[in-house]
Image: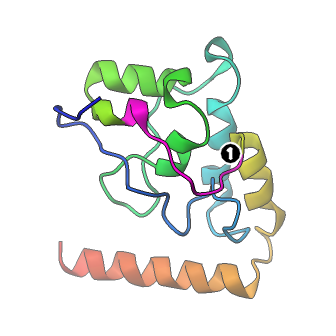
Amino acid sequence: MSGTSNGALPRKNPCASCPYRTNVASGIWDESEYSKLPAYDGEMHEQTSAAVFMCHQGSSEACSGWLGHRDPTDMLAVRLGLMRGDLDPSCADYATTVPLFESGADAAAHGMEKISEPGEDARAVIGKIIRSKAVRAEHA
């Protein structure tokens, strides 16, 4: 599908701090962010979120880890996002070779493991995100 709408596009690849990436450090995001992930799991009738999951980097792009962790068209939020025009049609065909957790529950469990005491690698990523958001705020 080629994109013709004004809806959110996916990033080329999931960002380095994406909670769906298997190689991302645990404890980067707030617990409330990790708790959103399992709502997109299961068969369509079992999914409890219809909200498009946007990139945590604060961009206007759809989260590519979310789109790529399973067939995007098997997610209620993707189908509704396409119908509402919240997502660009290219999101329906999104795929990546970046290793991702197979479910939101697995990604959330990993992310929550060290949320109380993030390791040095997680703290470095958190610092980078804070600096990046501060720079964007200065230029807004």
Q: Which residue is mark 1?
A: 35
Report the residue at 46% width, 49% height from top: 63
Residue 119 in magenta?
A: no
Identity, as a three-letter code, of the amino acid under mark 1: Ser
Quick check: 25 left or right of 85?
A: right
11 is higher (above) or lower (below) than 116:
above
Residue 113 placement: quadrant: bottom right
Image coords of residue 49 (percent x, y): 56, 27
Magenta residues, start to end: 91-101
Residue 96 in magenta?
A: yes
Quick check: 38 left or right of 61?
A: right
Asked if one can make out residue 91 in the rendered structure from this viewpoint, the answer is yes
Report the residue at 37% width, 26% height from top: 81
Report the residue at 46% width, 79% height from top: 130
Residue 68 placement: quadrant: top right
Count of numbered marks: 1
Front one among 70 and 30: 70
In what quadrant of the picture does the C terminus appear?
Answer: bottom left
Image coords of residue 97 (percent x, y): 56, 53
115 is higher (above) or lower (below) than 67:
below
Q: Secondary structure at mark 1?
A: loop
Quick check: 29 left or right of 116?
A: left
